[in-house]
Image: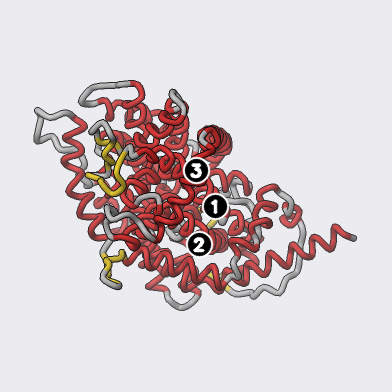
Amino acid sequence: MTSKQRILFSVFISIPFINHAQQSRGLDEQINDAFMPFATWWEDFILSTVTIFGYGIPIVLILLLLGALFFTIYFGFVNIKHFPTAIQVVRGKYDDLESLTIETTAQVYEVEGDLVDTIKDESHHGEVNHFQALATAVSGTVGLGNIAMVAVAISIGGPGATFWMIIAGLLGMSSKFVECTLGVKYRDIDSDGNVYGGPMYYLSRGLKERGLVKLGKFLAIVFAILCVGASFGGGNAFQTNQAAAQIISRFGIEGAASGSIIGFIFAVVVGIVIIGGIKRIAKITEKVVPVMAVLYVASALFIIFSNFSFIDDAIGLIITEAFTPKATITGGFIGVMIQGFRRAAFSNEAGAGSAAIAHAAVNTKYAASEGLVGLLEPFIDTVVVCSMTAIIIVMFNMDGAFVYGDVINGQALLADGSRLGGVNLTSMAFDNAIPGSSYVLVIAVTLFAFSTILSWSYYGLQSWKYLFGRSKWMDLTYKIIFLLFTVLGAAITLDAVIKFSDAMILALVFPNMIGLLLLFPKVRSEMKRYLDAIKVLKLKNAN
């Protein structure tokens, strides 16, 4: 292990997350008390603001959204124009391109001494197909952020936050297209056919190609460190936290260590799967994702149409309060917008670069093909799933079950005086519409949490290996620490886990978006190459 690797490794293994100083308190409370100060400091650091028109707006959200808007315009509204093409790619309509040799006018250049076209031919040995790559990535984004974070956003920002979540999701489709294309373009494949890709590689290799060697290496290392942290937080701790909260609430489980016990059970099940690597994860997620999606979407649609008369009222509130929120909402119009954008970023991770790690493992020789597949994620995640959750919660609150903006530690005040937030608020909304439906939500929540944890274990492991090497010992070390955070997440409070998870996901935007803004011209050439190949294939089939 090099000196750099030893230093980085020591940082991670020395993270203190259990405090035994107060033996009289329950285990869950001890863990939370020790973790909260770090979570609060990290959130304040990452969400540093600049004052614009009298409002403090987080710098990271400005970077995220301006970048997404730029990519949307630069690529000719790829999120809309090529949405049908993306569907066809996932369906396998253009799979024949992988076995054909099609000449294009794409530029040929070198990366680390190899011709790029040669790299592409060699890289046509990915580990998963388009659907499996999408399923793995979707399972990492369509998680409890779609159930719990939507509730948090609406509790704090009111119904209008939903509108801005949708806008952020639509713009984020373009960012996802760029980062997933780059993820495949600059990936690395070892002698055994194992794929290593993601922002770590396109930052270091892509910027080296532009003569920015030191900047590329620095951004790659920063991203990898943050991605490991994000895998512990938003991709793991938050998922088990909300799954445990739902299980404890629905089944009335009591005990000072009940969260830790549920987290331990999760850790055992997750550990059995992640030992198998991306191929096993992909096989699990391609089965779990459709089941959980159908289960949740079907339940949500049933509830929405069972209360058909309230649909127009709910949608009306979402639109009107996006621009003219009630006085109780902190920050007014800007505050609502920030909540929507912030929760959308956590939910679909567009611009954060994490999903590019999963998409890099796809079996293709056209990088842009997977970029198009990737743009479907924010649409599925935010525009579809988050919107349905939001409509149900807004319908639930038509009679004033809680006051928008009246939130303490992430918990909304309900009519009976108890504080609930996150997934428990969504659960109450489900039960209010159809008594007993919250038990269906328990199953969905568990599947959402499980699949997201699986995907993020892969993201974090890839980043860990970039930092510390690809040895089996390093592989095992990461997985052990990851599983410890599975237990940790179930033990701490929603407020603590949101602070840490939100900030960790958003922190990825800084190094990743800088890289995207420097490398996007390469995506344009890849896009042209793939679309030209599709045209040739269509002509060939027509003849």
Residue picked out by circle 1: 379
What residue sits 23% from the left and 49% below the top?
Answer: 39
Disc number placed over residue 241 in the picture, else none: none
Q: Residue furthest bottom?
A: 211
Foreground pick, 126 / 437: 437
**Of callouts 3 and 2, which one flags the residue occurring earlier in the amino acid sequence?**
2
Pair 3/1: label in front: 3
Check disc 2 and report the residue beneath it: 171
Q: Is residue 240 left or right of residue 104?
A: left
Residue 354, position as x, y percentages in the image? 45, 54
Tell me if residue 494 comes above or below residue 190 in the rendering.
above
Q: Looking at numbered disc 2 in the image, what kind of residue is underneath it?
A: Leu
Q: Quadrant of the N terminus?
A: bottom left
Could you say which is closer to the camera, residue 417 or residue 495? 417
Q: Amino acid at mark 1?
A: Phe
247 vs 386, nearest the viewer: 386
Amino acid type of the residue tagged 3 in the rendering:
Met
380 sits left or right of 351 in the view: right
Quarter location, residue 29: top left
Question: What is the quadrant of residue 232 in the picture?
Answer: top left
Q: Name the residue rendered at 34%, 41% in the picture.
A: 238
Q: How many marks?
A: 3
For this rendering, which residue is in front, 375 or 420? 420
The alpha-carbon separation of the residues under discs 1 and 2 comes to 10 Å
Alpha carbon of mark 3 to alpha carbon of mark 2: how far?
A: 19 Å
Q: Are marks 1 and 2 in contact (CB under 8 Å)?
A: no
Q: Nearer the viewer, mark 3 or mark 2?
A: 3
Return the residue at label 3.
388
Report x, y in % for residue 119: 61, 63
